[in-house]
């Protein structure tokens, strides 16, 4: 190894995914020790196995404290531009029911710990990712955001997970363009500090944020946003004039206001909103809707004449609820210019049921529709075949029909179903697959 050119050795060391391996390389030879200091990225995560060994009486004295390993890597590094530190997913998924842990050895957003390493590398840092250990962090309020904002003036990307964050002392970070907060208790109930201190954000991911009441995203440069909201906020507002892609998952806010005229790709999962205000999206091409009340959601939006790629799914709702059920007529009326349609299992089953009960009178169809992808149950073969025949009759320009059959349908029924579909209509190109709850769709093409 010592005979290799130093630039090649450095390239090899830079490709190590786990900086624990980098720490081991430092004790192998003087050359590796010297070159490892030139690596620009540090990526260190505590595994469940390491955590278990650090708690077991027989092995805990053999395990170097995680924070000590990290601080050693930082202190001897030069020009670090990216830092990623955290706990692996199996460890992050532990709860108080699994283990009681009041120590702070994996409390990674701890201010004392952060103050020991962050100022050393802050000057050249472009990216920081900290995935905390929720059992140790959830009851400890951290002011690490204020420390990061005061030290890291060149930071472009920031990712924080599994922590309780204060916004006290937070100052502006005009260079930051990407922010991810995931499973965070945030002391910024309206997102005012996020809006004011991160004005240049182009990518914002807010996943499972607690502590919000009436949050408003007001970011002029935002282009991509993913926002998963609990049922606590009373209202949600998004004002982002340059937003192009939005994924919004919420329950039933009293008010939902979206003002993003350039939006072209929109994924909305919503149970219900008492007040839904959405300005017309003149550039919207791709739309994905998930709701127990799809038809009511259709009525809340302006005309969707620009939509080309449409995905809809009807999620579970109380059977006693008297609401208009999803059917193809409402879909065709709402999206007359769609070219590709993807029907989730709930939407397909509800539309098929409405057709069977005579509640799906369709005078026209979607003349421009070229492709349908659907998740099918095949609870009654004759009903399913009749419904498919009805769909093909109404969509006269359809060229591709892709059906995923539920994995618990008997193979003999599946084979007969496929055979009869293909015999019925030869003008479309058929594609077949299997689906099952909690599993990835599996395409098997033209037969089983």
Image (cartoon, rainbow, N blue to C red):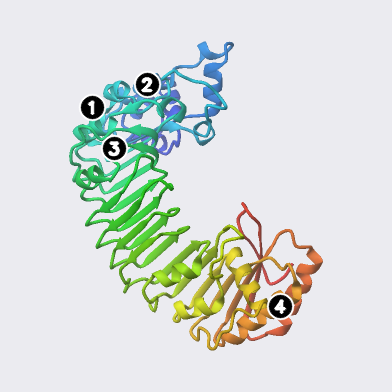
Using a 10 Å C-alpha cutoff, classify the residue at mark 2 as few (fewer than 14 neighbours), some (14 to 19) or many (20 or more). few
SS type, badge 1: helix
User: Alpha carbon of mark 2 to alpha carbon of mark 3: how far?
Assistant: 23 Å
To which residue does mark 3 refer? 81
What residue is drawn where x is 27% and y is 45%?
191
Side of 381 where 365 appears, left or right: left
**Mark closer to the chain start, 1 or 3:** 3
Q: Work out whether residue 335 can be spotted.
A: no
User: Alpha carbon of mark 2 to alpha carbon of mark 4: how far?
Assistant: 72 Å
What residue is drawn where x is 35% and y is 44%?
180
Checking the image for residue 119, the label placed there is 1
Coordinates of residue 171 in the picture (x, y in percent): 18, 37
Coordinates of residue 382 in the picture (x, y in percent): 75, 76
- Disc 2 to disc 1: CB gap under 8 Å: no
User: Alpha carbon of mark 2 to alpha carbon of mark 1: how far?
Assistant: 27 Å
What residue is drawn where x is 40% and y is 64%?
266
Q: Quadrant of the N terminus?
A: top left
């Amino acid at each position: 190894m010592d005979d290799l050119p130093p630039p090649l050795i450095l390239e090899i060391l830079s490709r190590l995914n786990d900086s624990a391996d980098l720490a081991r390389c430092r004790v192998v030879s003087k050359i590796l020790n010297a070159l490892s200091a030139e690596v620009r990225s540090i990526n260190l995560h505590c595994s469940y196995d390491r955590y278990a060994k650090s708690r077991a009486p027989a092995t805990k004295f053999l395990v170097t404290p995680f924070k000590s390993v990290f601080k050693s890597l930082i202190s001897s590094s030069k020009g670090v531009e990216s830092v990623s530190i955290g706990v692996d997913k199996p460890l992050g998924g532990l709860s108080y029911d699994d283990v009681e842990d009041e120590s702070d050895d994996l409390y990674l957003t701890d201010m004392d710990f952060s103050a020991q390493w962050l100022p050393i590398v802050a000057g050249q840092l472009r990216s920081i990712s900290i995935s905390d250990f929720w059992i140790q962090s959830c009851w400890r309020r951290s002011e690490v955001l204020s420390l990061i904002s005061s030290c890291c003036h060149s930071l472009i990307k920031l990712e924080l997970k599994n922590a309780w964050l204060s916004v006290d002392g937070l100052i502006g970070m005009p260079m930051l363009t990407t922010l991810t907060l995931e499973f965070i208790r945030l002391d910024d109930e309206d997102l005012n500090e996020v809006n004011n201190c991160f004005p240049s954000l182009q990518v914002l991911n807010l996943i499972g944020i607690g502590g919000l009441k009436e949050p408003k995203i007001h970011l002029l440069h935002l282009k991509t946003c993913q926002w998963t909201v609990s049922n606590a906020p009373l209202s949600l507002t998004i004002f982002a004039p340059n937003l192009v892609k939005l994924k919004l998952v919420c329950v039933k806010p009293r008010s939902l206001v979206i003002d993003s005229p350039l939006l072209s790709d929109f994924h909305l999962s919503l149970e219900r909103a008492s007040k839904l205000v959405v300005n017309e999206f003149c550039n919207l091409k791709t739309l994905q809707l998930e709701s127990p009340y799809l038809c009511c959601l259709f009525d809340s939006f302006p005309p969707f004449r620009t939509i080309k790629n449409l995905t809809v799914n009807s999620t579970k709702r109380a059977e006693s609820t008297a609401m208009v059920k999803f059917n193809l007529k409402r879909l065709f009326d709402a999206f007359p210019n769609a070219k590709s349609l993807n029907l989730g299992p709930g939407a397909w089953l509800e539309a098929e049921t409405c057709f069977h009960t005579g509640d799906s009178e369709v005078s026209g169809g979607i003349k421009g529709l070229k492709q349908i992808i659907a998740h099918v149950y095949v609870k009654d073969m004759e009903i399913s075949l009749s419904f498919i025949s009805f769909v093909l009759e109404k969509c006269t320009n359809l060229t591709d029909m892709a059906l995923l059959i539920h994995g618990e349908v008997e193979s003999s029924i599946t084979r007969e179903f496929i055979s009869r579909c293909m015999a019925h209509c030869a003008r479309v190109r058929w594609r077949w697959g299997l689906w099952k709850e909690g599993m990835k769709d599996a395409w098997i093409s033209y037969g089983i």
